[in-house]
Amino acid sequence: MKKIFLILLLAAGVVSCSDDLSSVNVDTKSPTEVPADVLFSNATKNLFDQMVSTNVNRGIFKMVAQYWTETTYTDEANYDLIGRDINGAQWIILYRDVLKDLKEAEMILNENPDPTLSEANIQNRLAMIEVLQVFTWHVLVDTFGDIPYTEALDLENSTPVYDDDAAIYADLVVRLNGAIDQLEAGAGGFGGGADYIYDGDAAKWSKFANSLKLRLALRYANVDDTKAATMATEAIAAGVFESQDDNATIQYQASAPNTNPIWTDLVQSGRKDFVAANTIVDVMNELDDPRRDDYFAQNLGEGVYKGGTYGANGNTQGNSTIFGEIFTDPTLEGVILDYAEVEFLIAEAAARGYITEDAETHYNEAVTASIIYWGGTEAEADAYLAQPEVAWDESIWLERIGIQKWIALYNRGFEAWSTWRKLDVPELPNAAQSGLPVPLRFTYPTTEATLNGDNLAAAASAMGGDTQQTRVFWDLD
């Protein structure tokens, strides 16, 4: 079962109320007082909520990727991260509400394991925790670059040093390989509904871990091609996602507080803050993309799609296309990695010469998988791929993958932003009001300057400055 069970004690006992990184270094409650499965569940939901959310106070990646833009208030679409402490929200939620709980769950399983569990089951649980930790750490690195890592969750250290982003990634690969080797199919995992993603299915977790490894492999492209090729080859051979049934998802529920966060912002809030951005609408119109009637509403008339100018004033839900009806469903599943993405990654690895697979076959499968996922048909996918502007072209493979993957990642703004930074496709305009280009990273939270200023300054110096245009290690010029 992929169901979220509300555990009221978590809000009071597991998570600190502080809004700075030092909160993860305060032992407010002994972790042994909360079961490992509860901590694992809470961390999982917090991770998905943050990756899915489009709330202007915490998760603006749909705007950073230029899928949506704003109506009344346009600061966030113009890349103001400080006004609402958006960078701080990404930082504290992933450190405090995800990594801290996962670390404590790991401690409990290592130091006070349930005697009714088999050793193989305990090892699977630890491996599942490790996979989610690696996922979360990689998101933090991709967001900020250098971050506290080796000292970050040390309760005795309130001013952790920042580690080099490339060094963190190298360690994450080692950790992920260890988790993959540790997972034993058939030995189970977290039971009783505690595993919202795969309900304790270790074989599914293995596919997830290998698919994540494939994603990390392509982050190394042009940085360390030998490592990228080795990782991609190993991940595919060990078994990545083979269909949409393997996707890393959780199923949200119809009642608050377990609804999809998008529903909370679009429906429960009663606000009309967002419209589709012209950036993506124009591209999909030019390609006669069959996903338009799923991604967008036809509020301007049947078959009419007109995006609001990205980052501009004057966009309203009366003069611009809005989001499709599916995004008003509170039970819409949350996704952090899916089959279509994996197929795009395989196509890219093949196009780069890392593997011997046929790039065109996997590109076609990726596009088809996305269209069908959003309610389209095989016939629609075939017709779409037959267009000269969409059909595989080895001479411009990067452009083909970049545009089509960006379209397919429409509901996953963070990975769309990361993929855009890696491939530099499509061309995204500067925000209309501020004139600022798309951020290449988030700047550090202002609370870090106050609480851990010396280490922040050292990290900023090492990276070349704490600016939105400083690149993380895998984002080459």
Image (cartoon, rainbow, N blue to C red):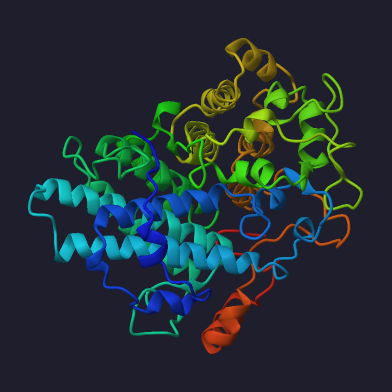
Q: Quadrant of the C terminus?
A: bottom right
Say left or right for 192 vs 93: left
Question: What is the x, y in percent for residue 396?
Answer: 69, 35
The residue lying toward the viewer, choosing from 381 and 214, is: 381
Question: What is the x, y in percent for residue 382?
Answer: 63, 14
Residue found 54% across the figure and 89% down from its top: 454
Q: Judge whether 9 appears above or below 83 on screen.
A: above
Question: What is the x, y in percent for residue 162?
Answer: 48, 78
Question: What is the x, y in percent for residue 149?
Answer: 41, 72
The residue lying toward the viewer, choosing from 473 and 180, is: 180
Any part of residue 148 in sight: yes
Please state the total of marks drawn on the protein image. 0
Residue found 53% across the figure and 67% down from its top: 91
Say left or right for 95 vs 411: left
Residue found 61% across the figure and 45% down from its top: 264
Q: Judge whether 384 appears above or below 208 on screen.
A: above
Any part of residue 170 in sight: no
Q: Judge whether 269 appears above or below 471 on screen.
A: above
Quarter assignment of residue 25: bottom left
In this view, the residue farthest toward the top is: 379
Q: Quadrant of the N terminus?
A: top left
Say left or right for 175 vs 161: left
In this view, the residue farthest toward the bottom is: 454
